[in-house]
Structures are given as structure tokens and as C-alpha cells.
């Protein structure tokens, strides 16, 4: 996965997904990137915009990410790593952090889900859910992922 500048691509929006864990809300808006995709070569590229909003009373820092990516054939890839897009943002109560990233698939449809490991100012760690979100190229038959 790589970070994608938001203005670089013409995106075709797919939908919006949301989950809240411990008063921290994660919103995901995926989109299809037709200019980056090569269906004849088995490559469909999707972008996703993530917004993390801290509605809790604690300052938290995003320390790591986990992704579980399933393509339309059921092939699974798991991705773990520090932070997001090279950052480990600190969110005070009421703050939000937004970033864009992307995911190539070998099929025109798939699904992603995951979590972020957060840490409080006193060093306690916990995971927050990233809701499962569907990745579907608009010209394909929509699958229930």
C-alpha cells in the first residue's frame, strides 16, 4: 500500500463506511482509480480516504496499522506496519486526522478491513476498528463483499 495524493487522480467514489471504538471514529471513503488501473493486465487500483476523529477525553497516538485485504478470488493479504503514510499522528480530544492511501487488486472487486493500534499518553495500548469496506470497479457486476 502506498500513500496517494488526493488531487492526482480522478476518483470514482464507491461509498462511506464508519466504525467507532472507545469514542474514536474511523470513517472510510473508498474510490476506484481508472487511470491507474489496467484491467487487461489484471490490475485494478483503489484509493481510500481515512478520517480518524477522537471523540474521547484522552489524547491518543496512532502507533501501527493492520489490514486484511481479500480480493474477488478469496486471496488474502495481510499488511502490518508502523503508523500510517509515514506518520504516527497524535490526536487530542476533538482532533481528527485524515489521510489518503491506495490498494491494488488482481480482481475488480474486493474487501478491506483492519485496525489501528492506539496508545494513550500514559502508555496504554488498544486497538480501534477500521470498518470493512468494499472495493468494486464501477463497470463490474457489484458483489456483496
Image (spheres, rainbow, N blue to C red):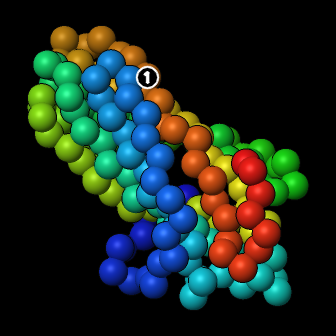
- The answer to which image quadrant residue 118 occupies is top left
State the image coordinates of residue 89 (x, y, percent, origin top left): 24, 42
State the image coordinates of residue 54 (x, y, percent, origin top left): 22, 32
State the image coordinates of residue 10 (x, y, percent, origin top left): 45, 84
Write down the residue under mark 1: 127
Residue name at image x 14 percent, y 19 percent: 57
Which residue occupies the foreground of this view, 144 or 130?
144
- The answer to which image quadrant residue 143 occupies is bottom right
Quadrant holding the N terminus: bottom right
Q: Secondary structure at mark 1?
A: strand
Residue 43 visible here: no
Residue 7 visible here: yes
Residue name at image x 43 percent, y 41 percent: 18
Q: Is residue 95 depicted above or below 101 in this figure?
A: above
Residue name at image x 42 percent, y 70 percent: 4
Residue name at image x 73 percent, y 48 percent: 145
Q: Is residue 127 depicted above or below 15 in this figure?
A: above
- The answer to which image quadrant residue 52 occupies is top left
Amino acid at each position: 500500500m502506498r500513500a496517494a495524493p488526493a488531487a492526482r487522480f480522478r476518483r470514482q467514489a464507491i461509498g462511506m463506511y464508519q466504525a467507532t471504538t472507545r469514542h474514536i471514529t474511523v470513517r472510510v471513503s473508498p474510490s476506484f482509480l481508472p487511470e491507474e488501473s489496467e484491467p487487461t493486465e489484471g490490475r485494478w487500483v483503489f484509493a481510500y480516504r481515512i478520517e480518524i476523529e477522537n471523540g474521547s477525553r484522552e489524547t491518543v497516538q496512532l502507533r501501527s496499522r493492520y489490514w486484511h485485504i481479500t480480493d474477488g478470488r478469496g486471496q488474502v493479504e495481510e499488511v502490518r506496519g508502523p503508523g500510517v503514510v509515514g506518520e504516527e499522528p497524535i490526536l487530542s480530544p476533538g482532533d481528527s486526522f485524515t489521510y489518503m492511501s491506495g490498494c491494488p487488486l488482481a480482481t475488480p472487486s474486493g474487501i478491506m478491513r483492519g485496525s489501528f493500534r492506539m496508545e494513550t499518553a500514559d502508555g496504554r495500548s488498544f486497538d480501534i476498528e477500521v470498518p470493512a469496506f468494499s472495493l468494486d470497479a464501477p463497470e463490474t457486476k457489484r458483489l456483496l463483499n
